[in-house]
Image: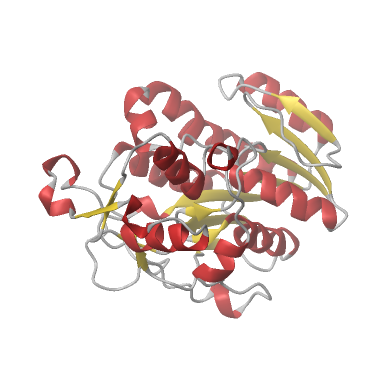
Amino acid sequence: MKILLTGASGLLGHAYAQAAIRRGHSVTALYHQNPPLADGLAQSIRLNAAQPEALTSLCLEMWPEVIVNCAAISAPASVDADPKLAEKVNVALPRLLAQLATHLGARLLHISSDMVFDGQSSEAYRSTDMPCPTNLYGQTKLIAEREVLEHNPEDPVVLRIPILMGNSPSGQRSVHEKLLAAIHAGQRPKLFCDEIRQPCAASNVADVLLELTERRDLHGIFHWAGSEKLSRFEMGQRILKHFGLPLDSIQSVCQSDDPAHAERPRNLTFNLHPIVSKLKTQPLNFDAQLEELTRVEPLNA
């Protein structure tokens, strides 16, 4: 199939491109700054999300069968720092892609986030639960979901995902890369013991996306995550143990002790039904995710 992929140089976009190419699909990769590193791409095109005319022309020329949107400004602080740019990338781009997918008769897969929820539930969130974001990033992702479903009502997939594990193409953007870099710089990072997440390997999400690419009988909003629910601090401890580093390299803190983070979601865990029973791909435990990680170069010096 001819696939148009946005955000191809990011952690998930890179993993999906590799998975799709291995399956024999033709992938045209769009990126903003850093060229994608996946081997075997049909095309690699630099495109600014603020240029909707260029994207429209490309789609009409290429006529993709599938559009996969992994592009996003995903750091809440970056969204707060430049709300206008965040609106263009996180909202306007998905809206345009949904409109183009409808016109082209293409399947649209859009990546959303666990941050559309407020984290106040004592139970894992179902895909049918009412979203209630607590920050601007979560708000942009929720608005994008609604735009996708409005403008591509017949065949959309909105896949909400959690914090991702993996080796980023830049070697600087994933959870373990940031953590190890901070420790190497002499810091002792503070990680919350009362913020519960459900981390997932980017490669595992990519496999799910690939199945959804090929399964047009599945559409709607779905949740995907790893099989373990861990605090930020527990994640940090297991990353340190995996790389043979002292466990006291990080500090355990509570959200309640830091007024600046009092509004952060506390429990962003997912119920994966019904999608988990319909796919061959299954969630990975955290140890399996750790096995995929490589150690960043500065710590080897």
Up the image or down, 24 lies above or below 180; here it is below
Q: Answer left or right for 131 relative to 96.
A: left
Q: Quadrant of residue 219?
A: bottom right
Toward the viewer: 230 or 70?
Answer: 230
The C terminus: image quadrant: top right
Q: Answer left or right for 293 relative to 90.
A: right
Residue at image x 46%, y 39%?
A: 181
Q: Residue 173, image x and y in percent?
A: 52, 39
The number of numbered badges drawn on the structure is: 0
Q: Residue 113, image x and y in percent?
A: 44, 51
Residue at image x 82%, y 51%?
A: 21
Up the image or down, 56 lies above or below 228; here it is above
Q: Residue furthest front?
A: 301
Residue at image x 37%, y 22%?
A: 82
Toward the viewer: 262 or 72?
Answer: 262
Q: Residue 63, image x and y in percent?
A: 81, 38
Residue at image x 15%, y 47%?
A: 262
Toward the viewer: 131 or 163?
Answer: 163
Q: Residue 68, image x and y in percent?
A: 66, 46
Tell me if I can see residue 154 in this picture. no
Q: Quadrant of residue 259?
A: top left
Tell me if I can see residue 259 in this picture. yes
Toward the viewer: 234 or 247?
Answer: 247
Up the image or down, 130 lies above or below 261; here it is below
Q: Answer left or right for 160 relative to 133.
A: right
